[in-house]
Amino acid sequence: MATDLETAPAPSITDSDSTFTVSDCDSTILHGISWKMYRKLRKMPENYNIRMTYDRGELEIMSPSPLHEGIARLLGDLITVWRLEHRSVPIRNCGAMTIKRSVLERGFEPDHCYYVQHEPQMWDKKKINCKTDPPPDLAIEVEVTQKLMDKMGIYAAFRVPELWCWSGTTLKVFELSKEGQYVARETSLCLPSFPIAKVQEIVRQLGTVHESELICSFHDWIRDNAQPR
């Protein structure tokens, strides 16, 4: 079995009756992977920089591209700028933590996730237990290449109330309905005054304007246009 997924070819990862599919992007899907194998691969220190999404026997292994990481980082930075101007809104940033549950046979790492409504009970926790603690109130998923797995279905299985999806050049906001399906929204449920359209406009400029300038422009826009809650 390969010990480094970043350099070893996916076919060398073996589990009983497993197969693999290689896409034309930076992702590979392995089929027939057991929960035990997924947990073993996820815990290997040499795989810490690799994103893994597991869904009942299917394992997507992704090595994020510079574009993917740039968009994700900028979105996180803009949320940080916004929260500094809205200090009355408590937020616990959990980054790209691994979220997994054996009973669901699913596991994933969002690009960002936050506790907002549940921040009062989560702000000081050193370790989060997905069995007993609530899921993040808000998660962000960035897609810049071919979508291989049903990420929305996985988020819904964990009952994540709000999901932001960056796809192509668009930032979309979704709320989990009572029926367990994500429904599009115009504004954020967790951060109602967060300017989704303005952030989309700024992120679209990534690669043509320096990141520091984009962040500063957002800070100036908030100062001139937005009122703290």
Image (cartoon, rainbow, N blue to C red):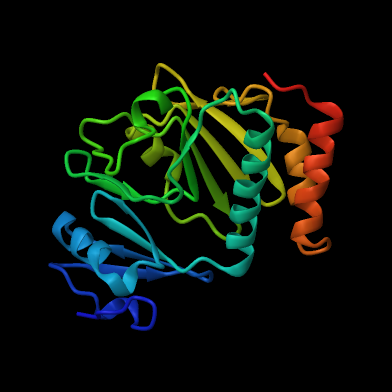
Q: Position of residue 13 (x, y in %)?
A: 24, 75
Quadrant housing residue 33? bottom left
Q: Nearer the viewer, residue 62 or 15?
A: 62
> Residue at horizontal 76%, vertical 35%?
197
Q: Position of residue 130 (x, y in %)?
A: 26, 38
How many callouts does the rendering have? Answer: 0
Q: Is residue 77 left or right of residue 96?
A: right
Q: Is residue 229 left or right of residue 154?
A: right
Question: Is 221 located above or below residue 88 in the figure?
Answer: below
Taking the image as drawn, is residue 204 in sight? no
Taking the image as drawn, is residue 122 in sight? yes
Quadrant where the C terminus sits is top right
Quadrant where the N terminus sits is bottom left
Q: Is residue 48 left or right of residue 203?
A: left
Question: Is 205 located above or below residue 190 in the figure?
Answer: below
Q: Nearer the viewer, residue 109 or 151?
A: 109
Quadrant housing residue 122? top left
Q: Position of residue 81 (x, y in %)?
A: 68, 41
Q: Nearer the viewer, residue 116 or 51?
A: 116
> Residue at horizontal 41%, vertical 16%?
178
> Residue at horizontal 28%, vertical 71%?
45
Quadrant housing residue 155? top left
> Residue at horizontal 34%, vertical 50%?
98
Q: Position of residue 101 (x, y in %)?
A: 22, 42
Q: Is residue 29 left or right of residue 229?
A: left
